[in-house]
Amino acid sequence: MPIVDDTYFFDNRKERIMMKISYKCSIVKYNPDPENGWKDCISFIFEFLADNKIVRGLTVEMFSPFLIVPLSPIQELVTKEGLKGDYWGLLVVDTPKIFIVEDYEFTMVSLNGCTLRGGVTKSNLNKCELSSLYELADKDYSINVIFTNPNEETSNRQFYYCPLLSSSLYFDK
């Protein structure tokens, strides 16, 4: 996955602030409970090259959660993808929108004006049984976003999980 060096915009209620941030994007397909008929999920994962404090701050700015609650780790992500650490659920009033702008590129925009550009590789899509992000328009997946960092101490790694509404995906094609 290529590292994105992006300018992250957020509004701190007084002024619009720009911050340079580096991160990697990927998507992961999994099913949290196939035995009980749950549908497949697609997670848009933003892995920020930053410490836990900065990732939590970005999470709060991007999602504006009214509550952050501990979650049990998503076992399929832990066992198949190696995403071990502490999981946190974000309870939000309004979810961000994800605009699919190219086969491999997207932009996430929150209602408070925060934006993040993202992209995935062809091999990442193939692993999810997709050839283009546009195929998400024709699939019935639960969509969510996870913010994290590549903390080498897996006991200290944080995952911030936010489910999105199906109407949160927009396709510019």
Image (cartoon, helix red, strand yellow):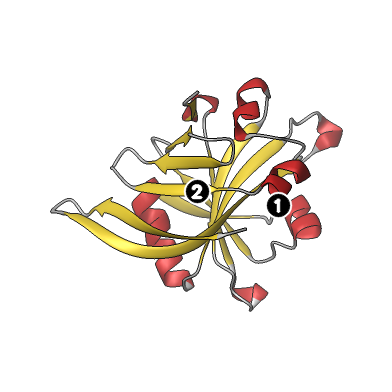
Q: In this view, does 64 lie to the left or right of 14?
A: right
Q: Is residue 18 left or right of residue 155?
A: left
Q: Which residue lies furthest to the left in this view?
A: 14
Numbered disc 1: secondary structure: loop
Front of the two marks 2 and 1: 2
Q: Which label is found at residue 74?
A: 1
Q: Which residue lies furthest to the top in this view?
A: 138
The quarter of the picture where the N terminus appears is bottom right
Q: Can residue 160 be seen in this view?
A: no
Residue type of the residue flagged with mark 2: Gly
Q: Is residue 8 left or right of residue 173?
A: left
Q: In this view, does 73 lie to the left or right of 110?
A: right
Counting labels gives 2
Give the residue at mark 2.
Answer: 118
Residue 20 picture location, percent across and down: 34, 64
Q: Nearer the viewer, residue 149 or 171?
A: 171
**Residue shown at 46%/71% (left/top)?**
50
Residue type of the residue flagged with mark 1: Ile
Numbered disc 2: secondary structure: strand
**Residue shown at 66%/39% (left/top)?**
42
> Cα distance, mark 2 to mark 1?
23 Å
Q: Nearer the viewer, residue 173 or 20?
A: 173
Q: Residue furthest bottom?
A: 153
Q: Can residue 166 be seen in this view?
A: yes
Q: Which of marks 2 and 1 is nearer the N terminus?
A: 1
**Residue shown at 66%/73% (left/top)?**
154
* Mark 2 nearby-residue class (10 Å; few <14, some 14–19, many ≥20): many
Residue 33 picture location, percent across and down: 79, 39
**Residue shown at 77%/51% (left/top)?**
76
Residue 61 picture location, percent across and down: 34, 53
